[in-house]
Amino acid sequence: DKLPLIKYQLANNEFPGRTAETSLIKLTVEEIPELLNGGLDDPLEFADVLILLIDVAYLRGINIIDAANQKMDINQLRNWSVDPKTGISHHV
């Protein structure tokens, strides 16, 4: 493993049958809503989201840290705008 930040042994021991899909479902159905519904000031809610996202990548054999750094290099070369109606940024 190239990702020492997450203790995979717990997930591997406790949930050996998990898949990237089931972890992603848990992330989107349980953890992100918890973050959005009052957890934005709770570091542990952010940790739950991060752990599951990293686990999904791990289960697919992806080093998410390397991928994030590669994507940031791409993003730095893009032009960005913010939708005035939604406040959401997009590359153009």
Image (cartoon, rainbow, N blue to C red):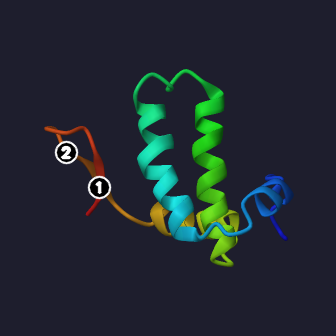
Residue linked to disc 2 = 83
Of helix, strand and loop, which one carries label 1? strand
Q: Position of residue 28 (x, y in %)?
A: 43, 51
> Which kind of residue does numbered mark 1 sit on?
His
> Which kind of residue does numbered mark 2 sit on?
Asp
Q: Position of residue 80 (x, y in %)?
A: 32, 55
Q: On the image, which quarter does residue 65 sit in?
A: bottom right
Of helix, strand and loop, which one carries label 2? loop
Relative horizontal placement of residue 91, taking residue 61 as reference (left or right): left
Q: Position of residue 25 (x, y in %)?
A: 46, 58
Kindly identify the residue that appears in the image at 59 percent across and 33 percent down. 45
Q: Are marks 2 and 1 in contact (CB under 8 Å)?
A: yes
Q: Position of residue 75 (x, y in %)?
A: 46, 63
Nearer-N-terminus badge (2/1): 2
Q: Residues within 10 Å of mark 1 (few under 14, many from 20)?
A: few
Q: On the image, which quarter does residue 66 sit in?
A: bottom right
Kindly identify the residue that appears in the image at 49 percent across and 69 percent down. 74
Residue linked to disc 1 = 90
Against 50, residue 85 (above or below) is above
